[in-house]
Image (cartoon, rainbow, N blue to C red):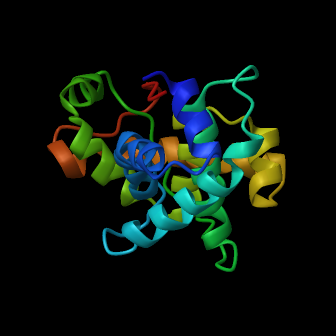
C-alpha cells in the first residue's frame, strides 16, 4: 500500500494503518530522540508523545505540499525541543582553540556511525541541539533561532563551537588527533 493510502486510512481511524506508520517510523524517530539526548529509558515515552501528536495532526497533513517522513521528523524535533524547554540549554565557551592537521581526516574516515552518535551525544547540550538542528536536520540559523528562542548569532556560535569541540574530541575515540597550528579540517 502506498503512503497516501495509509494517510487516508489513518484519517479514518484505521488501527492497522496507525500500527503500520508506527512500525515504519518509530526506528527513525528513535534515532532522532537519541541524537537530541533523550535517554534510552525516556525514548518509549517520547515516541508515544510524538506519535500521539502525529495521529492527532494527520488530518492537517497535506501530501501535495510534502512527504510524510519530513513532516513526522518535524513533529518529532518540535516535541523533543518542547520537552526540553523548561531546561536551560548549556552554553559552553571554549578557552582552548586548536586547528587540526590532515591526520584527522583519516580519523574521520574511520569514524563509524555508532562512534559518531556517541561523540555527538557526549557534546554539551547546547552544542548538540544546534549541531543536530543545523547539520543533521537541515534547519537554518533563523529557524533555530525561532525554535529555541535564541539569537541567530548564538546559533551560529554554538555551531562553530560544536565543530571545534568535535575536532578536539576526535582523539578520545581514536587517539590519532593531535593539534597543530594553522591547519583545519571540515567536519561538515
Whole-percent x, y for residue 4 in the image:
58, 25
Q: Is residue 89 visible?
A: no
Left or right, 70 with respect to 60, comes to: left
Residue at screen point 38% across, 32% down: 100
Residue 173, above or below 62: below
Tell me: 65 left or right of 24: right
In depth, the one of 186 and 20 nearer the eye is: 20
Residue 32 placement, left or right of 10: left
Q: Quadrant of residue 148?
A: bottom right
Compared with residue 170, is residue 122 higher up or lower down, i.e. above or below? below
Is residue 117 visible in the rendered image? The answer is yes
User: Please, is residue 16 above or below residue 2 in the view?
Assistant: below
Q: Residue at x 51, y 54 (%)?
A: 128
Which of these two is toward me, 124 or 35? Answer: 35
Q: Quadrant of residue 24?
A: top left
Counting the numbered discs, the total is 0
Q: Position of residue 40 (x, y in %)?
A: 31, 68
Percent across and percent down for residue 65 are: 76, 22
- Image quarter (top left, top right, bottom left or bottom right) of the N terminus: top left
Residue at 42%, 25% (x, y): give it: 185
**Residue found farthest to the bottom:** 86
The x and y percentages for residue 9 are 56, 39
Amino acid at each position: 500500500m502506498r503512503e497516501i493510502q495509509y494517510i487516508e486510512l489513518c484519517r479514518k481511524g484505521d488501527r492497522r494503518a496507525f500500527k503500520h506508520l508506527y512500525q515504519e517510523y518509530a526506528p527513525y524517530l528513535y534515532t532522532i530522540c537519541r541524537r537530541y539526548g533523550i535517554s534510552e529509558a525516556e525514548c518509549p515515552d517520547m515516541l508515544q508523545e510524538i506519535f500521539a501528536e502525529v495521529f492527532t495532526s494527520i488530518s492537517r497533513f497535506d501530501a501535495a505540499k510534502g512527504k510524510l517522513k519530513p513532516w513526522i521528523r518535524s513533529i518529532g524535533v518540535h516535541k523533543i525541543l518542547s520537552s526540553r524547554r523548561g531546561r536551560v540549554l548549556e552554553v559552553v565557551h571554549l578557552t582552548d582553540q586548536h586547528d587540526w592537521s590532515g591526520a584527522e581526516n583519516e580519523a574521520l574516515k574511520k569514524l563509524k556511525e555508532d562512534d559518531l552518535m556517541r561523540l555527538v551525544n557526549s557534546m554539551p547540550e547546547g552544542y548538540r541541539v544546534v549541531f543536530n538542528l543545523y547539520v543533521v536536520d537541515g534547519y537554518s540559523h533563523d529557524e533555530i533561532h525561532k525554535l529555541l528562542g535564541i539569537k541567530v548569532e548564538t546559533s551560529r556560535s554554538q555551531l562553530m563551537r560544536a565543530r571545534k569541540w568535535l575536532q578536539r574530541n576526535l582523539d578520545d575515540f581514536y587517539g590519532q588527533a593531535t593539534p597543530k597550528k594553522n591547519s583545519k579540517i571540515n567536519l561538515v
